[in-house]
C-alpha cells in the first residue's frame, strides 16, 4: 500500500450541514437559536479530525444563487423544497466555527461545493499526498482514484464508509469514472437531472458494465433490445445533458495552496468563545486529543498532563481559594460569615446519596474569585453550624436541596435559604437544557470547571472525596462555591428582568425545605407483601410462557420481537394490512398488537406477559432494593428542574410512573404502608386542570357546571348530544371525558378517532360541536396560540414561562407539537403551581402546630400525608380547607379525601 507524507481532508460542508440538520432532533440554546445542524457538523468534524489525523484541511461551501448548470439546464434542482429558515440561520454559524479552527473555507459564485472539491483534487494528480473527502453526497464518488478516497456518511451521522476504487466497484458495480454516466442514464430526482426515462438503477448499471459509458451504449444501440432499447432510442441528447450536469467541474476559480490548509496550533480562544456563545460545553472534552489543544490555563488537559494541569490550577493567580483547617482559621471564617448578608455554600461528600453518604467538607464564597473550604468531615464546627442555622443570614447555592439533606444528616438544619441558582436557571429557560453548575459556568463566563474525575478517578479504581488530599479537594470545592456565588449575582438580575423573582422567592425556595423533609421522611414499604406478589407474578409469567408455546405450536422467546414477528406474521399468518412496518419487518409494539386482538389467543397472552414482566422488573422486584438500610423506608428524590410545566418529578423510585389504571398496578400501591397507629391520608384535587381551564378561558358552560357542583363530563355529554343529563349513558360520559381532557393536550380529529373509536367525519363533527358548545375554550386556545407564536413561550397564571422555540419551525410536525405544548402549559403549569402553593400552606400549618401530620408524597394532583389514626378526620378536614382556599379561581377548588393503612386501599372520607 502506498505511503503518503501528507494527508489532505476536504470537507463538503453543505452536504454535512444538511445531513446533521435532518439526522438530529431540534436543538436550541437559551436564546432560542436553532443549532442542531451546527452541533451535528461539529460532531462529524471533530470525529474526522481524530480518526483521519490529517495534516491539511480545507472546507468547501455551496454559494448562494444559481450555478453554471442552470445556464445549461434552467430546471436544474427546480423541484427542491425551500431550505427551512431554521437551517438557513445555521450556515453562517458553521462558517464561523470552521474559521475559528483556522481552516481555509471556499465558496465561489455559480459553483457548488463539489466543484471546488474537484478543483482542489485535480491539483494533486501524481503528487505525494493522500486526499480524503468527507461528505454525505453520492455524486462525489466520481472523484475517487488511487490517491483520493471518499469518507461517506451512510446512516445518520455515526456510520461511515471509506470508498476507494475497489469499494466503489464492490458497492455499485461501476468504476468511479462511470458514476457520471450512471447519472446520465438514470438521472437524479433530487437535483432534477432528467436522465433517460425508463432506465432504472439495474438497467443503467448493466448497460455500463457491458458498454463502458454513454457513448459506448449508443454506439451499440442496435444490440440492445426490449425495454432498454425503447427507452434509449431518440434520447441520447438527454443522456449527454444529464451526464454533463452530473460531472463535477475541476476548473473552478479558487486560489488553493497546501500552505493555507496546513494544520497548525488551533486558535483555542476563538473556539472556546464560540462554544461558550452557542452552549456547546459538552463538545469541549472531545477536543482534548486533537494536536494543538495542549494545556492552557488548566483547560483541555490530556490525561498524561494531569499533574501539570493540577499545578496550573493551584498556582492560578486569578483565584484566591483558601483551605480552612486550624481552630483559628475556623474562628476567622465564622466571623467573616457573620458579617455577610448572603453567602454561597456547597458541600463535598463521599457519594451522591445524601442519606447514606458522609459529609467531607463545606465550601463558602461571598466574593468573586474567592472561596474557603472547610474540611470538617462528618462533624461541623459549632460556630459554623450556628451560622448555617441562622435564618437571618441568607444563603444561596446550586442545587441546595442536596446540600441541605447532607447537612441534615450531619446534624445541621440549614435555615435562611434565599436563592438557588439551578432553580433560577430553570425558571429563566425551562424549555432549555444544561442547568448544571459546570455548564452554566462555561456558558456564562467561559470557564471550564475542574471535572470531579480529576480527583476521584473512574471505574473500579474510583475513590471518594474523603480520600482526596485536602489541598486538591479545596480548590475543587472553592471553585464550586465561587461560581455558585457568581451565578447568584447574574441570575438574580436576570430573574428580575424577566419578572420571575416572586415565583422563585414565594414558591420554589419555600418548597426546597418541604421536599427535603419529604425525602428524609420517606415512606414505609411492605417488602413481604411485594415478595408474595413477586412469587405470584413469576408463577403466572411461567404459565403464560407455557400457554404461548401451546398456542403457537412451537417454542419461542416471548421477549424477542424478532421471534414474535416470525410467529405472528409468518407461521400464524395473522393479518398485516393495518400493522405498521419497520425496517426489520412488521411491528409488534403494543398499539399494533391491540389491532390484532381477537384474531388469535396468542395476542392476549403476549399482552399479559408484557404487562407482568414490566411490573415485576420495574416495581415489584426493584422497590425492595431501594429500601434505605438505615431507615427501613423508601426515599424518593424530587426535582424542581425537570418538567418544563413546573410539575415535580421524582426518581428512585419514580412515583409518578406507578400504574393505577390496572388492577395489578393499583395493587403495587398497597406496598406503601403507614406505621402502626397511623394512617395514610390522600388529598386529591378533583379535575384541577379542567377547573383551571374554566377559569382561564372564562367558558360559561364549564364555569356554571363547576360552580353548581355538576359532573362536568355528564354536562358536556348532554350538551354535545342535545339530551338531558339524565339521558347520558356511561359510553357518552366516557367519550366526553376523553375530549374534555384531550383538548388540554391539543387533541384533534385524529386523537378523537383513536380514543373514541369513531370515524373521521364523526370525530370532526364531534370536535366542531364541542367548540360550538364551549366557545370560551375555543377562543382561549386561539388566544394562547397567537400569544405563543408572537413571544415563543407560554406562561401560567403565576407567571411561570416555558420557552417553545419550535413554534417558529417550518417543520409542520414540530410546530404542531409546539402548539400543543403551548396550549397545555398554562393549564398543567398552573395546576402544578397550585399544588406547590398547597404544599407550602399545609407545611406552614404543620410548622405552626396547627396540624399534626407529615407530608410524605406528591404525585400528580395528589398529596399523601402520614397522620395519627386517632385524629385522621379532624386533620383531614383542616388540610382540605387549606388546599381548597389557597387561591381564588372563578370556580371552586375541590379536594377529595381518602385514608387507609396503605396507599392502594384507601376509603373515602366525608
Image (tube, grey):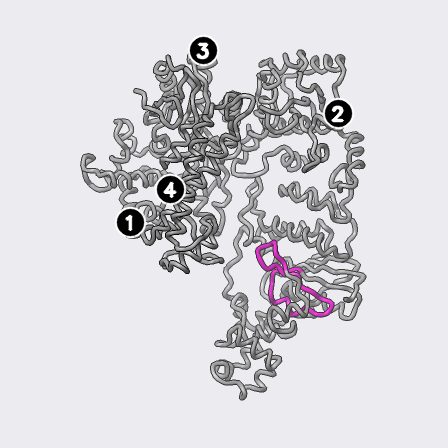
Mark positioned earlier in the residue sequence (4 or 3): 4
Marks 2 and 1 sit apart, C-alpha to C-alpha, by 69 Å
Q: Say whether disc 2 or disc 4 marks the residue closer to the N-terminus.
A: 2
Label 2 CA crowd tier, 10 Å (few <14, some 14–19, many 20+): some
Q: Are marks 2 and 1 in contact (CB under 8 Å)?
A: no
Residue 333: x percent and y percent? 71, 16
In front: label 2 or label 3: 2
Q: Is residue 256 visible?
A: yes
Q: Which residue is mark 2?
A: 470
Mark closest to the chain's N terminus, 1 or 4:
1
Q: Whole-Å distance between the Cαs marked 2 and 4?
A: 60 Å
Q: Nearer the viewer, residue 532 or 577?
A: 532
Indicate the position of residue 583 as horizontal and vertical percent values.
49, 58
The quarter of the picture where the N terminus appears is bottom right
Residue ranking furthest to the bottom: 222
Nearest to N terminus: mark 2 or mark 3 = 2
Determine the CA span between mark 4 and mark 3.
47 Å
Q: Horizontally, is 721 left or right of 137 in the view?
A: left
Q: Vertical placement of 713 versus 377: above or below?
A: below
Q: Which residues are magenta?
A: 134-160
**Residue 250 is covered by the magenta coloring:** no
Secondary structure of the residue carrying tag 3 is: loop
Q: Position of residue 757 (x, y in %)?
A: 30, 48
Of pointers 1 and 3, the one earlier in the residue sequence:
1
Which disc, if any, is residue 758?
A: 1
Quarter of the image for residue 128 reads: bottom right
Q: CA distance from mark 1 to mark 4?
A: 26 Å
Rendered view: 86 above or below 851: below
Amino acid at each position: 500500500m502506498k505511503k503518503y507524507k501528507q494527508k489532505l481532508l476536504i470537507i463538503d460542508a453543505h452536504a454535512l450541514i444538511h445531513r446533521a440538520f435532518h439526522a438530529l432532533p431540534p436543538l436550541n440554546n437559551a436564546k432560542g437559536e436553532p443549532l442542531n445542524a451546527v452541533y451535528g457538523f461539529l460532531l462529524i468534524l471533530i470525529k474526522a479530525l481524530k480518526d483521519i489525523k490529517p495534516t491539511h484541511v480545507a472546507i468547501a461551501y455551496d454559494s448562494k444563487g444559481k450555478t453554471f448548470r442552470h445556464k445549461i439546464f434552467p430546471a436544474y434542482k427546480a423541484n427542491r423544497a425551500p431550505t427551512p429558515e431554521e437551517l438557513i440561520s445555521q450556515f453562517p454559524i458553521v462558517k464561523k466555527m470552521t474559521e475559528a479552527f483556522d481552516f481555509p473555507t471556499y465558496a465561489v459564485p455559480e459553483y457548488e461545493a463539489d466543484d471546488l472539491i474537484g478543483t482542489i483534487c485535480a491539483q494533486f494528480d501524481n503528487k505525494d499526498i493522500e486526499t480524503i473527502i468527507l461528505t454525505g453526497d453520492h455524486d462525489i464518488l466520481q472523484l475517487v482514484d488511487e490517491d483520493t478516497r471518499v469518507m461517506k456518511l451512510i446512516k445518520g451521522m455515526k456510520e461511515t464508509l471509506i470508498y476507494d476504487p475497489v469499494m466503489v466497484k464492490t458497492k455499485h458495480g461501476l468504476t468511479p469514472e462511470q458514476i457520471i454516466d450512471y447519472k446520465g442514464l438514470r438521472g437524479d430526482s433530487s437535483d432534477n437531472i432528467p436522465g433517460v426515462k425508463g432506465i432504472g438503477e439495474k438497467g443503467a448499471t448493466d448497460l455500463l458494465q457491458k458498454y463502458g459509458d454513454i457513448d459506448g451504449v449508443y454506439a451499440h444501440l442496435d444490440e440492445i433490445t426490449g425495454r432498454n432499447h425503447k427507452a434509449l432510442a431518440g434520447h441520447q441528447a438527454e443522456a449527454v445533458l444529464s451526464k454533463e450536469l452530473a460531472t463535477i467541474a475541476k476548473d473552478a476559480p479558487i486560489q488553493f495552496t497546501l500552505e493555507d490548509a496546513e494544520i497548525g496550533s488551533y486558535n483555542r480562544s476563538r473556539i472556546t468563545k464560540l462554544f461558550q456563545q452557542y452552549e456547546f460545553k459538552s463538545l469541549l472534552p472531545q477536543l482534548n486529543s486533537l494536536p494543538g489543544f495542549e494545556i492552557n490555563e488548566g483547560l483541555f488537559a490530556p490525561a498524561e498532563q494531569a499533574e501539570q494541569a493540577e499545578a496550573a490550577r493551584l498556582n492560578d493567580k486569578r483565584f484566591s481559594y483558601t483551605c480552612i483547617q486550624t481552630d483559628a482559621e475556623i474562628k476567622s471564617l465564622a466571623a467573616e460569615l457573620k458579617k455577610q448578608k448572603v453567602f454561597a455554600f456547597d458541600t463535598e461528600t463521599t457519594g451522591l446519596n445524601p442519606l447514606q453518604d458522609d459529609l467531607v467538607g463545606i465550601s463558602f464564597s461571598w466574593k468573586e474569585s474567592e472561596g474557603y473550604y472547610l474540611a470538617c468531615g462528618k462533624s461541623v464546627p459549632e460556630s459554623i453550624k450556628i451560622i448555617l442555622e441562622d435564618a437571618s443570614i441568607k444563603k444561596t447555592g446550586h442545587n441546595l436541596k442536596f446540600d441541605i439533606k447532607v447537612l441534615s444528616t450531619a446534624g445541621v438544619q440549614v435555615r435562611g435559604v434565599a436563592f438557588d441558582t439551578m432553580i433560577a436557571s430553570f425558571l429563566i429557560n425551562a424549555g432549555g437544557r444544561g442547568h448544571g453548575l459546570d455548564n452554566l459556568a462555561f456558558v456564562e463566563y467561559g470557564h471550564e470547571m475542574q471535572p470531579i474525575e480529576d480527583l476521584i478517578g473512574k471505574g473500579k479504581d474510583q475513590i471518594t472525596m474523603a480520600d482526596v488530599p485536602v489541598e486538591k479537594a479545596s480548590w475543587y470545592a472553592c471553585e464550586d462555591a465561587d461560581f455558585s456565588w457568581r451565578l447568584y449575582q447574574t441570575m438574580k438580575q436576570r430573574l428580575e428582568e424577566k419578572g420571575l423573582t416572586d415565583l422563585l422567592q414565594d414558591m420554589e425556595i419555600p418548597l426546597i425545605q418541604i421536599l427535603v423533609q419529604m425525602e428524609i421522611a420517606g415512606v414505609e414499604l411492605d417488602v413481604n407483601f411485594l415478595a408474595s406478589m413477586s412469587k405470584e407474578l413469576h408463577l403466572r409469567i411461567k404459565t403464560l410462557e407455557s400457554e404461548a408455546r401451546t398456542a403457537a405450536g412451537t417454542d419461542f422467546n416471548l421477549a424477542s420481537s424478532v421471534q414474535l414477528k416470525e410467529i405472528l406474521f409468518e407461521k400464524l399468518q395473522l393479518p398485516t394490512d393495518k400493522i405498521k412496518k419497520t425496517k426489520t419487518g412488521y411491528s409488534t409494539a403494543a398499539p399494533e398488537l391491540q389491532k390484532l386482538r381477537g384474531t388469535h389467543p396468542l395476542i392476549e397472552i403476549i399482552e399479559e406477559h408484557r404487562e407482568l414482566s414490566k411490573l415485576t422488573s420495574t416495581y415489584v422486584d426493584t422497590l425492595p432494593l431501594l429500601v434505605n438500610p438505615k431507615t427501613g423506608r423508601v426515599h424518593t428524590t424530587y426535582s424542581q428542574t425537570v418538567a418544563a410545566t413546573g410539575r415535580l418529578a421524582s426518581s428512585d423510585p419514580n412515583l409518578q410512573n406507578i400504574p393505577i389504571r390496572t388492577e395489578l398496578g393499583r395493587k403495587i400501591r398497597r406496598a406503601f404502608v403507614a406505621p402502626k397507629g397511623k394512617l395514610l391520608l390522600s388529598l386529591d384535587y378533583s379535575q384541577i386542570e379542567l377547573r383551571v381551564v374554566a377559569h382561564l378561558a372564562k367558558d360559561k358552560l364549564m364555569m356554571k357546571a363547576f360552580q353548581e357542583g355538576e359532573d362536568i363530563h355528564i354536562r358536556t355529554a348532554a350538551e354535545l348530544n342535545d339530551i338531558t343529563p339524565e339521558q347520558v349513558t356511561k359510553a357518552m360520559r366516557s367519550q366526553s371525558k376523553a375530549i374534555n381532557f384531550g383538548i388540554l393536550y391539543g387533541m384533534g380529529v385524529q386523537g378523537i378517532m383513536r380514543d373514541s373509536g369513531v370515524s373521521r367525519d364523526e370525530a370532526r363533527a364531534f370536535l366542531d360541536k364541542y367548540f360550538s358548545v364551549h366557545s370560551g375554550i375555543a377562543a382561549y386556545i386561539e388566544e394562547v396560540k397567537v400569544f405563543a407564536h408572537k413571544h415563543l413561550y407560554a406562561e401560567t397564571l403565576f407567571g411561570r414561562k416555558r420557552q417553545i422555540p419550535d413554534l417558529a419551525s417550518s417543520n409542520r410536525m414540530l410546530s404542531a407539537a409546539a402548539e400543543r405544548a403551548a396550549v397545555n402549559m398554562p393549564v398543567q403549569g398552573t395546576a402544578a403551581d397550585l399544588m406547590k402553593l398547597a404544599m407550602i400552606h399545609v407545611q406552614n400549618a404543620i410548622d405552626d402546630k396547627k396540624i399534626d401530620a407529615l407530608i410524605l408524597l406528591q404525585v400528580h394532583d395528589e398529596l399523601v400525608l402520614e397522620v395519627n389514626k386517632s385524629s385522621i378526620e379532624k386533620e383531614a378536614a383542616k388540610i382540605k380547607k387549606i388546599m381548597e382556599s389557597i387561591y381564588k379561581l372563578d370556580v371552586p377548588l375541590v379536594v377529595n379525601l381518602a385514608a387507609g393503612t396503605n396507599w392502594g386501599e384507601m376509603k373515602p372520607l366525608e
